[in-house]
Amino acid sequence: MTEAKTFALGDFVLQGGMTLRGAQLSYTTYGTLSPDRDNVILYPTSYSAQHHDIEWLIGPGRVLDPSRWFIVIPNQFANGLSTSPSNVGGAYDRGRWPDVTYLDNIRAQHRLLTEGLGIDRLAMVYGWSMGGQQAYHWGALYPEMVERLCILCGSARTAPHNQVFIQGVRATLTADAAFRDGWFHETPVRGLRAMGRVYAGWALSQTFYREELWRGIGFASVEDFVVSGWEGNFLRRNANDLLAQLWTWEHGDISANDRYRGDLRRALGSIRAKTLLMPGDADLYFQVADNAREVPHIPFARLKPIPSAWGHRAGNPAQNPEDERFIAKAVAELLAT
């Protein structure tokens, strides 16, 4: 597990007008920065993930090779490592955590790269799910800085059906008696277990369950898979952090800022990076159709769905070598252009 470093942001003014005082961004790096500083790949974190959950795909022969690339993983706000409800204290304790947008995350990451690491070019931004949505934001907010985007199972604007999914997860989690006055006062074990069970039905496809693909990754039954693989995963996390990240995800929109003022087509059209969109063809909430509607408006975009029964998890195939090979080949081709 790679040890994280910390970049101090100071008093960081959020898009919504509140200030995160003494804000910090946790990050890790892999590989060696080239003398020309032109081999940087930014790899933002996904929902509930910390850097050690996603660094599995970094390594010789993996999707991102640190012998060639200098890879930076910034932990997004509210993931428990960067400034989060679970570690902020002070004025933002006890249910007063402010709303944090993707724009806030990208501005913080930009400062890390430019002020902290002296980097002003990105060979690629690579991201899955919430990480993919951050990649879209990078392309629209700093088009002159980003050469390539590789977006797996993400969208430029969180779709209405996706929002309903998020709202259902939130309602499940906050139904626990530990949630009072907008805050979890103790660990909501029942709520976290329920959240994991709901999530398990959405993150994998019907085909995954029908063909019992969970057997191939070491589970004896569906119940074993749900309890150990999903309930156990969310029980590791702080419920207030999970709640805060849901808000960021639900309100994802690359045009929701002063530059684009809600004009999604204009925001998509501003992206100058060579863009590879890789939805999972069985993803139940980031659908191929969402990306297909975006592609005509992004000047240098290509759509390449992942043919997989793993649903949303096709974009993060830690236990699925076939999908990893598909993604690695596509990424290698993108980086060669």
Image (cartoon, rainbow, N blue to C red):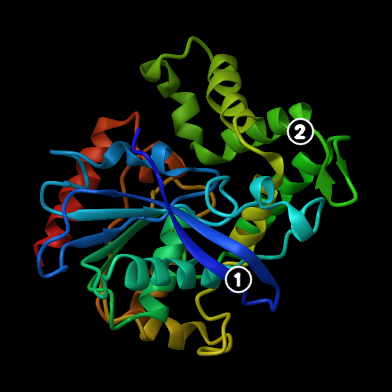
User: Could you tell me which residue is drawn at 76 percent across and 40 percent down?
Assistant: 172
User: As drawn, is 21 to the left or to the right of 298?
Assistant: right
Q: Is residue 125 above or below residue 219?
A: below
The quadrant of the picture occupied by the N terminus is top left
Q: Is residue 319 above or below residue 101?
A: above
Judging by the rendered image, the residue that carries numbered circle 1 is 11
Residue closest to the eye, 28 or 179? 28
Judging by the rendered image, the residue that carries numbered circle 2 is 191
Indicate the secondary structure of the residue bearing disc 2. helix
Q: Position of residue 169 (x, y in %)?
A: 70, 45
Observer-side mark, 1 or 2, equals 1
Residue 287 in view: no
Residue closest to the eye, 249 or 265? 249
The residue under label 1 is which amino acid type? Asp
User: As drawn, is 184 to the left or to the right of 52?
Assistant: right
User: As drawn, is 20 to the left or to the right of 40?
Assistant: right
Bin the neighbour count of mark 1 within 10 Å (Cα to Cα): few under 14, some 14-19, many 20 and up: few
Q: Is residue 100 above or below residue 323?
A: below
Q: Is residue 44 above or below residue 118?
A: above
Q: Position of residue 221 (x, y in %)?
A: 53, 12
Residue 5 in view: yes
Bin the neighbour count of mark 2 within 10 Å (Cα to Cα): few under 14, some 14-19, many 20 and up: many
> Marks 1/2: CA distance?
33 Å
User: Could you tell me which residue is drawn at 47 percent across and 50 percent down?
Assistant: 46
Indicate the secondary structure of the residue bearing disc 1. strand
Q: Of marks 1 and 2, which one's residue comes earlier in the chain?
A: 1
Q: Position of residue 130 (x, y in %)?
A: 49, 56
Q: Position of residue 247 (x, y in %)?
A: 67, 59
The quadrant of the picture occupied by the C terminus is bottom left
User: Could you tell me which residue is drawn at 41 percent across and 16 percent down?
Assistant: 215
User: Could you tell me which residue is drawn at 34 percent across and 28 percent down?
Assistant: 319
The residue under label 2 is which amino acid type? Gly
